[in-house]
Amino acid sequence: MRTLSRAITQRGTTAPSIPGMFTSLNERGVSVRTGEVSMIAGQPAAGKSMLALTLAVRAKVSTIYLSADSHLHTQSMRLLSMVTETDQSIVEPAMEDVEWAQSILRHHDYIRWSFNSSPSARDIEEEIEAHITLTSMPPELVIIDNLTDCLVDGDEFGGMRSFLKDLKFFAREYSTAILLLHHTSEAWHLGPNQCPPRQSLQGKVAQTPALVMTVVDQEGFLGVAPVKNRYGPSNPSGDRPSFFEYNPASCQIKEIPGTELIQA
């Protein structure tokens, strides 16, 4: 038992934001915070993984990226494309020059990768503990891509909710920010300029995360809506997203100059 006046002096009690969030989202009070679970959700191939990797590269903080959904070759190609602003179709054959690839990738070694195809909560905790053993500090950011690939106990949806409770414990215990990727229902009909609403999350898992961002790919633009936001305004229906220039071929997500919100 502690008083708040003493507890607030300890590491991890102030929930600082991870750096690198896009300005137009920051202006809406959107941030990925230490000690909290945040989520990016969307339909398959909507840009979830691209947004997560972009945020990790922009943040430049110690990161564990658990890539259950994509293997080493794919993530290496994406990162090389992202930082060189070159189409993946050009980068992939260029990766045969291993020295060239290493010369670029080593600048992003603050991201440590795990390619376990079905990590359990225990596996995730072991990755965090290994990071502490290696660096004497917990990672500042943990990205899990994605929830449906993780090994959960019990029935699928009940297991997901229990799994998120474990992640919430890890976030607080290790004073790290956890960013979890998840799917929304493909059966949900979206209107023009609309991201998936909070109700479309698979498994009714919206209760635990402090932040849920949903995404939609709209022909050269990526829409991002904070459908849940414990620390600021939210847009549960997803009908007021922030839009960004989006080129999946070269893994580019960029601010649109002078544009914050596009109303549906």
Image (cartoon, helix red, strand yellow):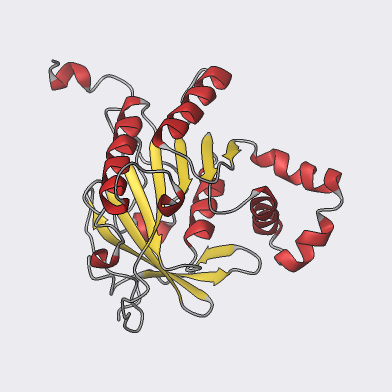
The reply to whether residue 243 is visible in this rendering is yes
Split into 4 quadrants, where in the image is the N terminus?
A: top left
Q: Position of residue 230 (x, y in %)?
A: 22, 49
Q: Is residue 146 above or below residue 132?
A: below
Residue 238, percent from left and from top:
28, 70
Rendered image quadrant of residue 186: bottom left
Residue name at image x 65 percent, y 52 percent: 79
| Quarter of the figure with residue 215 | bottom left
- Taking the image as shown, residue 86 lies to the left or right of residue 210, namely right
Residue 109 image position (x, y, % from top left): 65, 36
Q: For the C terminus, which image quadrant?
A: bottom left
Q: Is residue 50 left or right of residue 260?
A: right
Residue lying at 50% horizontally and 30% vertically, measured from the top left: 127
- Name above or below for residue 226 compared with residue 139: below
As drawn, 243 above or below 209: below
Q: Is residue 61 visible?
A: no
Q: Which residue: 47% across, 67% down?
A: 44
At 74% across and 46% down in the image, what residue appears?
104
